[in-house]
Image: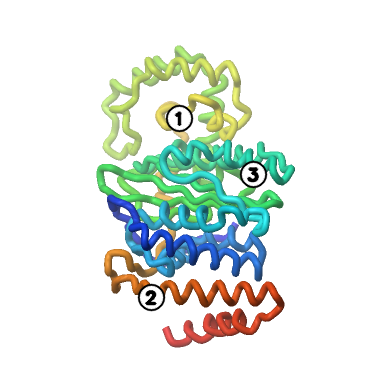
Amino acid sequence: MRQATRTGIANLPLHGGKAPRWLFDRMTKLSREISIAIVSDFGPEEMLHRLSDPFWFQGLGCVLGFDWHSSGVTTTVCGALKEGTKGLEEELGLYIAGGKGKTSRQTPAQITRYSEAISRDPAPLVYASRMSAKVDSCAVQDGYQLYHHTFLFTAKGDWAVIQQGMNEKNRYARRYHWLGESITDFVCEPHAAICSQGFGSTLNMVADESEGARDVVTRVASEENPEALVRELNTLKSLDLPSRHHLSLHDLHPEYLEKIFLSTYERKPEGFENLLGMQGVGPKTIRALSLVSELVWGVAPSFNDPARYSFAHGGKDGIPYPVDRKTYDKTTAILARAVRKAKLGNREEMEALRRLHRVFPQHE
């Protein structure tokens, strides 16, 4: 997996409302032409690579006319991509499932429907979708509750995930990028990037330095007597803990966790990934087991914040200037024409656009 380097910070404040219809319609058309151009020249796998790069994703949002600093760039850009490529999935070899809120819960069914249409086993893709959501909601506990999950995959089975969580206390959002081909382990440094600052202490059970904690947590869940675990947690709640301790006990209710502990004890997970994937194992279960492993066995998980990346510019709210609808439509038309001509063998206009890419960075 490519090593990420923090080069800046982009805070994504929660913005209410929706993108105006006049803008979203244009975003849909332009994102369709951009997708066709990239897939035509580089293949659908390249589209996954670019979308897993937060710099590129944020730049795409800017080109489409959305705010660089708004949480809505994630949901709106993903929605425009999904809508824009609708009906072109077989031609592009690129499939987009999921979305915001209730739509995100339809992701497994949408993956299955697309997979069956191309005679591909949906199980590994559904698993990847489920585990990426589990990791970012349970294994990385950073105060951001997931509300958006977009799963993209190709006919060959390559995949990427863009999902976002919100924090109602600080009114900011956080975006999580995944690229399937770079993942050798779902529970050890799986992210391509995490965007925006954290909030308070982050329990990061998928950090490389949390390997010992993952092993102990799995062992505790499968070997220890559930009643003993609950007694241990009740004891911990009564301790006068040192101020350096990062884990919070106030929201733990050991009596409610006994049923979950009994389930994990009976099913004996083989590893942390298997434990995390169990039905009913959520953030409080992982947090409780982390408490036991740290305070009783002295094996601490990582509290280093995994956020790494940042971004570009904007438009919808007039920053740095209002969206110029005439220019926007002209850009879409030029790109669409170049793509159509390239398909017919005339690549002159596409090559002209490519030359612009080489010229402008020199004058930035």
- Among the two numbered marks 1 and 3 on one chain, the one whose residue lies closer to the N terminus: 3
97 vs 321, left or right, is right
Tell me the element at label 1. loop
**Residue visible at 53% across and 55% down in the picture:** 192
Q: How is the image coloured?
A: rainbow
Q: Quadrant of residue 285?
A: top left
**What is the x, y in percent for residue 304?**
41, 48
Report which residue position mark 2 lands on: 326
Note whether residue 181 is visible.
Answer: no
Crowding at mark 1 (Cα within 10 Å: few <14, some 14-19, many 20+): some
Which residue in the rendered view is the most extreme toward the right?
119
- Among the two numbered marks 2 and 3 on one chain, the one whose residue lies closer to the N terminus: 3
Q: Give the residue type at disc 3.
A: Tyr
**What is the x, y in percent for residue 266?**
58, 16
- Among the two numbered marks 2 and 1 on one chain, the one whose residue lies closer to the N terminus: 1
Tell me the element at label 3. helix
**What is the x, y in percent for residue 291?**
40, 30
The alpha-carbon separation of the residues under discs 2 and 3 comes to 36 Å
Discs 1/3, front: 3
Q: Give the residue type at disc 2.
A: Lys
255 vs 84, left or right, is left
Quadrant housing the C terminus: bottom left
Q: Give the residue type at disc 1.
A: Gly
Tag shown at residue 282: 1
Tag shown at residue 114: 3
**Residue visible at 34% across and 63% down in the picture:** 67
Tell me the element at label 2. helix
Crowding at mark 2 (Cα within 10 Å: few <14, some 14-19, many 20+): few
Q: Quadrant of residue 363?
A: bottom left
The alpha-carbon separation of the residues under discs 1 and 3 comes to 29 Å
